Structures are given as structure tokens and as C-alpha cells.
Amino acid sequence: MSNEASGRQEAPDHQAPRLNPWWLVPLFLGALAEAMLFSHLIACANPELRPGILATVGGDTQSYLLPMDHLVDEGQYYTLNMQGEKTLAGRMPYYAVPYLLLRLAGLPAADIMAVLQAALFALALWALADLLVRETRSRWCGYLFMLAGGLSGHFTSYLPAILPDAIGASLAALAMHRFWLTEKRDRASDRWLLGGILAALILVKPYFAPLIALIPLRWLYKSRNLRQTAARSVILATPLLIMLAPWWIRNALVMGRFFPFQQDMYAGYGYSSTELRSRSFAQAAGEDGVVWWDPYSMASCMRLDPQPPSRYTWPEYFKDGTVAGFNQVVAAYKTFQAAPTPEHAATAEALMDSVQNAYIQQYPLHYYVTNHFNALPRLLFHSGSANLPVHASNPCYGSWQFLLKLAASLAYWASLAGLLLGIAWAFADRAANLWLWLVVPLYLALFFSLVVVAPEWRYFSGAFLIDLWLLFRIAPPALLKVKARLAKRT
């Protein structure tokens, strides 16, 4: 049985085929064209969301850019939260550093940032495709991977958005690429590059930080050499520590406090206690209390005048008394949103406490067991194309845009198939070590469904390229294996 058929591919060497770096050019141009297309469609429906030519803004954009604007205009890094108070250490400044430098240079900062995001995506796509070619010894696997990833509106629709989602996913893919190379060969340069990429990833997406601690454990397991692992761990952590040190020193001087990334879990947004209580109330019932712009979430039902309008319906197991109690909570919370007085806040929170206690007594199995897993299918199983600005109410809508939705859905479900194949392959062929590629997607899935309980689809986009890579790494060799067995029988 060949290494390719069995999945036990040896380390890439100088004889393995490679992917021409010139592929970066069409990949970048294609990514830029898709970013321009989606930016155009977004601007058609909501012109205010595209302040320039290419870049688009979202709900969190200003939390990254405004502190830099204040730093330039007023000499202080801060933003104002929902209570009108200064947030001195909400978002870390690292994602917006290019924006700051470009603005100081008098250039269209946001638009150039979107171009840079497209370029980084092209690099990540090429790097994984090249690794795929070396692993499978087939350039066609690399070509098909680039085609599937490059034409996926599921991911490329994030490219023009001035938010760290696209750059975070690209950095996650590049980190996995470099980590895999450290598995295959013993080079200090790979470890330094891995540390640098991981530092950049954590600086724009701090929730990836726990993953950096898993790598030394892997190295120790492989080498059984504590001193060697410690030395390599220093290399791994040094870039992150160097980059974080100025932020830590600044916060100590300005705020007299130490925290690793941001001042609180909510980046200093200043949510009211009633808003946070509404989230935990929905989560206690196994529902989504965060993503109010998803019309099928409980959060949209509890929102005053949500856009799009809520289509949420109460779970089928709710009895009439439960529905009545929840409706009372919704009414009280909407009253608070319309007039956020202390009295309305107290009424809404008291109702939430009362109805939640009644729910726990009536449905203990749901509360203590099954509800904890409800967010996972919401995070993973969806069309993969709902995030596209393609809908009949868009003035620029055309029937041909169905192809965009179809391509996005096919690519997302292909990536999900890669994740499921990877899980199956991890049990079937442990020697291939492909289970290492499962760490990022499984971490994101469990963290945002079980820990944070915020099943917003874009949070799982960080695993898209990794899951898609698994599909093309596992499926072709598996098909060759089946073909070889059938040929022997005939």
C-alpha cells in the first residue's frame, strides 16, 4: 500500500512537487474582485456601510478605529461606551495599527486595509494549497483547493469588512501551516515564524491565546525532553511577549491595572446589567441571547424593532404557562429598551429571575443537560450563505446572484465535510497525525457554543480554510485507496 493511499505521508522533501508562487497573483486579484463585488452589493442596500471605495464597516468597526482616531486627534487612546463613559482599554490597538499609519500618511486607510486583507487571504490560500500538493503529491489537489477556497463567498464576503475576522482566519490558517512544518522538520526558523504568526493572530483575536499553550505540550509529548521543549517554548512565546509588553506598560501607567488583553470580556462596551441578564436568561433556556440580527434567535424576539424582523418561535416543549411567562419577560424587556429607567430595569430583571426559576423547576433535564449543547448545531449547521448581501430587497439584486449563494453554501458544506472526515480519519489512522488539524475547529466550536454561548457564524469562520484543507487532504487519497482495492478485486 502506498503512503498516499494509506494517509501515512512522509515529510515533504526536495523531490515533492511544489505549487508555483506566481499563483499568488491570480489568487490576490480574484480575492480583490470578490471583495469589490460584495462591497458593491453591501453599498447598494446600505450606502452608509461603505465609507470609501472598497472597505465596509460593521457594528464593531468603530471600536477598533475610533480609539486610533482619538489618539491622532486628542492624543489619548480611548472610545466612549454605551453609558457615555471612556473605555481606555477596550480593543487592543494592534488590528488598527495599519489604519493609524495609513491615516498619518494621508492615504485612504480603510480601503487599503481591505486590500491588505485580500492579500493575506491569498497568501494563506496559496500556502495551504502548496502544503496540500506536497502532502498528496498531486498538484490537482492544490488547484481544486484554491478554486474552492477562492470562490467561496462564505469567506470572501468578509474580506472588505474592517473587522479582524478575515485577517484572523487567514492568520489561523498560516499558523496551522507553519505548525505542520514544525511537525515535519526540525528548523528553528519554522518555530520563530510560528511564534510570530501566532502573536499576530492572538493580537487581533485574543480568544486564540489558549492554543499557544498546547504546542509545547505537543513538543514535550514527541521529544520527552523537558529542556528542549522549554527552549523551544521561549522561542514560541517571545514574539507575543514583545508585542504585548508596550500594551501592558501603557495600561499599568494609565489605568494602574494589569490584564493580558482587554479590560473586560465585553471590550468595555458598557452593556447594562439588564442587557447582560437578558443574555443569560435566553442561554438558560438553551437559546441564543446574543445574535439579535439572526431572525430565528431568541435575542431577536427580545429586541425592540429588530432588523430583520424576528421570526423566532418558542420551543415546542414549552407549555402554555412557560410561553406566557416568557412573553411577559419579552414585554418587560422591550419596555426597558424603549425607556431604560431604573424602575423598568428592576421590573425586567425581577421577571427574568422569576420565570427562569420556574423554568428550571419545570424542565430540569433541559436546563442542566441538553440546553448546554443547543448552541453547537446553530453554530455549525446553516446554509453558509446567509451572510452574503444577496437578497431580493437589495436594489442591485439579480437572479444570477443565486450562483454566489450556491458557491458559498457548497464551499461551507465542503469545509464541514472536511471537519467530519478529519474526525473520522483521526480515529481510523492515528499514525497520519491529521488529528492535529482538528484542534482549531474543535476549539472554536466548543468555545463559542459551550463557553461563550454565542453561536454567531462568523466566529467559526476562523476554521474554514483549515476544514477545507482537511477535505482535500483526506478525500483524494481515500478515493485512491478504494480505487486500488477495487482494481485488485477485478
Image: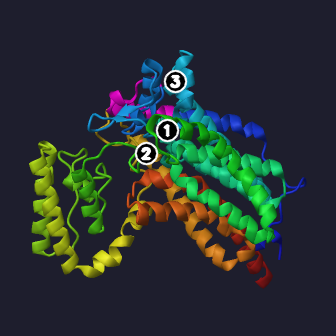
Q: Is residue 213 above or below residue 389?
A: below
Residue 41 left/right relative to 429: left
Q: Is residue 52 magenta?
A: yes
Residue 142 seen in the figure: no
Residue at 55% from the left image edge and 54% from the top image edge: 208
Q: Which mark is residue 109?
A: 3
N-terminal-most mark, 2 or 1: 1
- The magenta span reads 34-53
SS category of the residue bearing label 2:
loop
Q: Which residue is mark 2?
A: 263
Q: Which mark is residue 458?
A: none
Q: Position of residue 280 (x, y in %)?
A: 28, 61
Q: Which mark is residue 251?
A: 1
SS category of the residue bearing label 3:
helix
| Residue situated in front as seen by the camera: 373 or 488 | 373
Q: Position of residue 403 (x, y in %)?
A: 46, 46
Judge the density around disc 1: few (<14), some (14-19), many (≥20) Cα neighbours within 10 Å. Answer: some
Q: Quadrant of residue 433?
A: bottom right
**Number of on-image labels:** 3
- Asked if the residues shown at circle 2 and circle 1 are in contact, with their CB atoms under 8 angstroms apart, the answer is yes
Magenta residues, dominant SS class: helix
Q: What type is the residue that disc 3 sits on?
A: Ala
Q: What is the CA distance from the residue labelled 2 to the residue labelled 3?
A: 27 Å
Q: What is the CA distance from the residue labelled 2 to the residue labelled 1?
A: 9 Å
N-terminal-most mark, 2 or 3: 3
- Asked if the residues shown at circle 2 and circle 3 are in contact, with their CB atoms under 8 angstroms apart, the answer is no
N-terminal-most mark, 1 or 3: 3
Residue 44 seen in the figure: yes
Q: Is residue 344 magenta?
A: no
Q: What type is the residue that disc 2 sits on?
A: Gln
